[in-house]
């Protein structure tokens, strides 16, 4: 795999990212390294890596949380053929709408 990674094989880079994200295969979990390897793979339009990069941006794992970047990479993932990204985007939007509604309601009650 080392040779594949060095030759900038997107799938191999994605697999290295997974190892770092999960702390598998004798590798100590390192979210910053996972983020770096996902980024390398996304530069080659690897849809699975684009999705995982998007989720890292949503969670703020290995990188500062950034909803705009999260949406961008998740949408690119879907556009490049990763079908679960569509469901994820719909669920995330629904969650954010509920969260914002609850927050708005609480704020209004607290102000009154």
Image: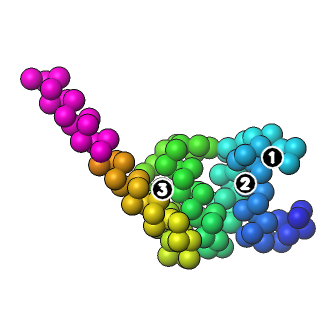
Residue depicted at x 78% and y 72%: 9
Query: What percent of the width, then of the height, locates residue 8?
Result: 78, 70
Task: Give the foreground label among 3 and 2.
Answer: 2
Q: Name above or below for residue 20 compared with residue 54.
A: above
Considering depth in this image, is 6 or 99 the residue closer to the camera?
99
| Secondary structure of the residue carrying numbered label 2 | helix
Query: What percent of the width, then of the height, locates residue 51?
Result: 57, 62
Residue 24 part of the magenta-drawn span: no
Q: Name above or below for residue 107 compared with residue 69.
A: above
- Residue on which the image places disc 3: 70
Residue depicted at x 87% and y 44%: 26
Label 1 or label 2, whichever comes before in sequence order: 2
Residue depicted at x 50% and y 65%: 85
- Residue on which the image places disc 1: 24
* Residues marked 1 and 2 touching at CB (< 8 Å): yes
Determine whether, in the image, residue 40 is placed left or right of residue 8.
left
- Residue on which the image places disc 2: 18
Residue depicted at x 64% and y 63%: 49
* Residue segment shown in magenta: 98-112
């Amino acid at each position: 795999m080392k040779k594949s990674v060095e030759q900038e094989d997107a799938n191999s880079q994605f697999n290295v990212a997974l190892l770092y994200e999960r702390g598998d295969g004798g590798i100590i979990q390192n979210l910053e390294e996972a983020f770096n390897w996902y980024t390398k793979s996304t530069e080659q339009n690897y849809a699975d890596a684009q999705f995982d990069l998007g989720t890292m941006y949503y969670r703020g794992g290995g990188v500062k949380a950034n909803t705009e970047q999260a949406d961008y990479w998740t949408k690119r993932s879907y556009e490049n053929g990763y079908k679960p990204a569509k469901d994820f985007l719909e669920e995330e939007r629904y969650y954010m709408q509920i969260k914002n509604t609850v927050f708005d309601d609480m704020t209004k009650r607290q102000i009154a």
